[in-house]
Amino acid sequence: MRSNGKPPSLAASLDEKQVRLSRTRTWGGLETQASYGPNDANERDYKRDLGDPGEFPYTRGAYPQMYRSRMWTLRNIVGYGAPEDTRDGIEKTLAAGGTGVNVVVDTLTQQALDPDHPAFGAEAGLEGCSLPTARDIDRLLDGVDLTKVDVAWHWTIMAYQMVAAVAVKRGTPLDKLQGSHMPDHLQETMCGWGTDLLPAQLSQRATVDCVEYCVRNSPRWTLGLPQGYDLREAGLSPVGEIAIGMAVVKGVLRDLEKRGLDIDQVAPSIAWVSTADVDFFEEIAKFRALRRMWARTMRDGFGAQDPRSMRLRIACHTSGRSLVYGQPLNNLSRVAVQSLAALLGGVQSVEACTYDEPICVPTQEARELATRTQQILANEIGAARTADPLGGSYYVEALTDKVEAEAAKLMAEIEEIGLLAAIDAGRIAQLMDDYNLSFRREMDSGERIVIGANAFAPPEEPPPRRFTFDPAATQAHVRRFKELKAGRDGDLVKRKVRDVYATAKAGNNCSQAAIDAFVADATLGEVWGAFRMAMGRPYDGYRVIEAPFDFEAVSV
Amino acid sequence: MGKARIIRCVLGMLGTDVHTKGIRTLAQLLRDEGVEVVYLGEHNTVPGMASAVIQEDADIVGLSFSTAAYLHYVRAFRDELISRGAGDVPVMVGGMIHPDDRAPLAEMGIEGIFGPGSTVPEIMAFMSRAADAYRNAGAVNS
């Protein structure tokens, strides 16, 4: 407390500056001890509970040699404007040393709204690449071999079906298709889309249809499921990520069993999409606990025989919500530690957030630094040298057990209600609200300290640099989209879109019909709208536009 | 009488933005402060949001944005309110607002701009002031 405007004494200043431990709980809220020792290991059996790296239950890593046999994929997210803009960004990223391409699509494409949507068209290309037709994906990946280059799509609705349509048009066999996307629609329902825009039942059906088609037709295509990253960002702890994520996966696998798919046909195609937040040890414990829980669930719960089903691959994107707007260069430190946690936790790919994530779409400089952070970890720090370097640490093993036990408890609570029912009843939203509210209250009380936010906040700073790009290409792209709609074979499109509707309405998997419709130049909005209507929902989730034609009419 | 009246605040998001974490948390924090929050949530269109503000007889509106389209949406929303004779309802915005956009927002009549690092007392102080001014102006006019 400073009063009457007098500067504080030096002694008082020093006292204020003293660093005290603000918190003994983990970032996710688990209580910890001052130290751990051999007595904190509750009857751990090495072979049963840990196993060598590459051995069941894969606590210590998915592969025996880990990064010696295969380095993690250094990924950067790229996506803005028209396909031509994003293409330019991808080329720059690869030139800077990235080894994988991750494409993020704009908010309209994410929600399967076309860029001519009357209410939201202004958002086209702003936060990602606008890809409303298969032709646009073809432009983005012109000259890229879809069987060789590993493109990861940060995109759920119809992403695979649209890429598959490009493959069909190019004469590329679907069973050779390489890449990945994130077919977890339920996560979208839980993370801000809500049950009106994306009802849980509709989400579940869309995911199960997509996963079924992918594993039957494109076994080399990787399915990012669950999309644990967004769950965490929306307000879950590491414990919550495992609990809800496992509930999502188990629900999908059970439905696929009913469609006659064996667990060993499905599980090897799955990779868990995760995050690394700022609590170094808690995140490492999470990755280890997750692999163990996954392995046991697949073997004991679903009867998996194939080790590839039990050995979980994890894709990690470092946490965006943990990054701070004030003094943003501090985010370089945060991202370095988060990326290190991901590597010591044994993930298969890392996307390091850019330090300017809280400010804008990443600038080119920030993207380059994010790649450099990973290169420093790979080449200088020794993060990749030896598998599971913290295995056997009294603390990390105890925390791994704790995260797993708490996750199992929460998962059981959710499954007791049923995940879809829990979502409909607002239980997951409540879980997230509680987490976010207590996070905020702890920040207000000073129990949780975030540098640059509620402590050591920088005085007035110059405005941070901001990513800008010329909207001309986006505008031309939207004009081109309208021209395509006006000039395509309208009768063919109608027939194909009606097929999507009729197939889905009959309770069948409409993925093939969707691919055929995209080949015929149907738009993302039209195909998804047809599926929505078949599921008894309005064509446009926002109820702004009506279906462009009658889906019930008999095809000719 | 005016001072004792509880602030009635409509909170919501425009467009396709799904980043509801901030505004959901703020809704609860404002309720804790005694504000009567009408939470419209995400995914509102400009006309839909304007109708709600008028129907709910709001003293103030709070819009949250985590995507880059906010200048477009705030302008369209202000124009919509004005065209429906509700242009004097104070509007505050929060979320990922870049400092470069403060001036254009101020030109649209947006005085309350909050973002990362804003505290509840700051937001409350602004809301009390803006809501009072709005009500008093309304009292003079009626």
Image (cartoon, coloured by chain):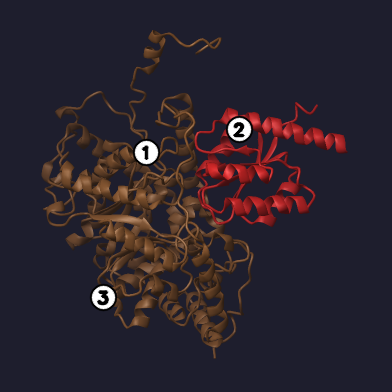
Chain colours: A brown, B red
Q: Amino acid at mark 3?
A: Lys
Closer-to-camera residue (A326/A280): A326
The mark lying in front, picked from 2 and 1, is 1
Q: Position of residue A128 (x, y in %)?
A: 45, 59
> Which residue carries the number 1 mark?
A329
Q: Residues within 10 Å of mark 2 (few under 14, many from 20)?
A: some
In this view, the residue farthest toward the bottom is: A556
Query: A200 above or below B62?
Result: below
- Residue B98 visible? The answer is yes
Q: Amino acid at mark 2?
A: Ile
Query: A95 above or below A319?
Result: below
Closer-to-camera residue (A148/A307): A148
Sequence-wise first label, 3 or 1: 3
> Which residue carries the number 3 mark?
A176
What residue sits 19% from the left and 34% below the top? A42
Q: How far separated are the C-alphas under marks 2 and 1? A: 27 Å
> Which residue carries the number 2 mark?
B123
What residue sits 49% from the left and 78% below the top? A500
Q: Quadrant of residue A211?
A: bottom left
Q: How far separated are the C-alphas under marks 2 and 3? A: 55 Å
